[in-house]
Amino acid sequence: MSKVELIKADDYNLPYEVWQFTPLDWACFRMVIRGTWIFDVPLDVDSMKNALPKILSFYPHLAGRMKDKSGLALTNAGIPFVVADEPDLLVEDLLKRDDYVNIKALSHEIKPARIQKGLDAPLSVKITRLRNGTALGVQCSHACMDGESFYTMVFNWSQLCRGEAIEQPVLDQSLLNVSAFNSPAEAKEAALEAGWKKISIFSILKLLPLIASGVFRKRSGPFHISSDTIKNLKEKLSTRAGLPYSSNVALSALITKRCMELFKHPENTMCSIVTVVNTRERLAGIPSNYAGNSSFSIPTPAFSAAASLDQIASVVHQTLEKVRKSPSSELQSLMELNVYAIKNKLPLAPFDVMGMNAKKPTIIYLNNFSRLHIYDIDYGTGSPVKVIPHNLKDQVVIWPAPPAVGGVEIYFAGVPVRYVSKLEPGFFNTSEIASGGSDS
């Protein structure tokens, strides 16, 4: 049995009555971010409930409702808060499930269609008391937050629950400007010059069989890569290149190389890696605590499927080095183009969407969450023993492993699942790679 309560924000003071959606927000409107934290101890439900109005006062749009397509009116109608009991369910049994990534019962479902009609809040919270622990499930409309701001919001809630201060999130949506192209034709020309790909109605029709078959809904279990493997590989690649590669570069190269081998591409097949980049502090005027959507997908130049680990790492490093600056003029131009293209419904994408969804994908789309507030959530009784990744359709998710284990976990979605479904969990964690002994 469970009971749904509506929790409202404490007093808040904003200079407007509606939190406006940006074009990026609208592009994410049909998606919902689902976060699930598993604790092996009972959580103090009353304390967490009492802190919810406080966190909502920092994010009052989450307790609002849509009245029109402009955004969320700050009605403070409240968010659903649910407490449920599963006295026969053990933490250990929950995490043994093959499909635990897809568990829906641990959170309270929110539906984009109902949000758009103004019937539901864009955020929900559910606490499930297990026999020997607790599960916390939070769902949020992706139109309101990206991964960075979502996991930061939950972290902030835990801080307030412990009586600690948090950094004030920035809710000013006007900070994400749209560049002043003179016309869609001018923007289209700029996009094609930047290497963007056209999206035709025929290419969309080609995806329909995959959608109907449920391929896009498939998710793999985790593949573990140890801290030692990452450290050794990064050091080997950096030494050979004479450049300080990041862990993300090393992981991107490793995952991509192994995927190319699994897909059995001919050596002359041209491939690319797409990296989801957090643009905060890299775009002029977008601070680190910006609370809306502020990410962009950066593709690398094409490289051969036969490329070595060193060659792939070099391509990724050079691509990301251009947008790491603070601020980055190149990233600024790309983001402005992206926002304009979305707003004006231009049939263009920064990368080859069809290549990502081909029977043998030539695009590896990577979203790295390993540096976000994932495991440092603490409501006063300690950190979670497991955090289940979100259920969005990112082709490859790099996720932090539990601190007691170390390293990262790799999850796949969509077409690659059929290639990795029978692999051992340590496939990407071989001693050969850890020693830097092979680039093949």
Image (spheres, helix red, strand yellow):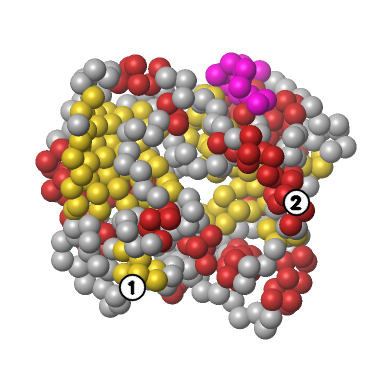
Task: Please rate how many residues cluster around mark 2, counting C-alpha atoms within 10 Å: few if below 14, some from 14 to 19, many from 20.
Answer: few
Residue 58 figure quarter: bottom left
Q: Which residues are magenta?
A: 418-432
- The residue at 27%/68% (across/down) is 74
Q: Which residue is mark 2?
A: 203
Horizontal side, residue 146 vs residue 360: left or right: left
Callout 2, which amino acid?
Ser
- The residue at 38%/21% (across/down) is 95
| Residue 423 inside the magenta-drawn segment | yes
Relative height, residue 1 to residue 8 (above, below): above
- The residue at 39%/28% (across/down) is 402
Q: Residue 289, image x and y in percent?
A: 37, 60
Q: Residue 398, image x and y in percent?
A: 52, 36
- Label 2 residue SS: helix
Location of the C terminus (image quadrant): top right
Callout 1, which amino acid?
Val
Q: Which residue is mark 1?
A: 18
Instruction: Give me the disc on residue 87.
Output: none
Q: Residue 357, image x and y in percent?
A: 69, 41
**Front residue of this view, candidates 340 and 223:** 340
| Residue 239 inside the magenta-drawn segment | no
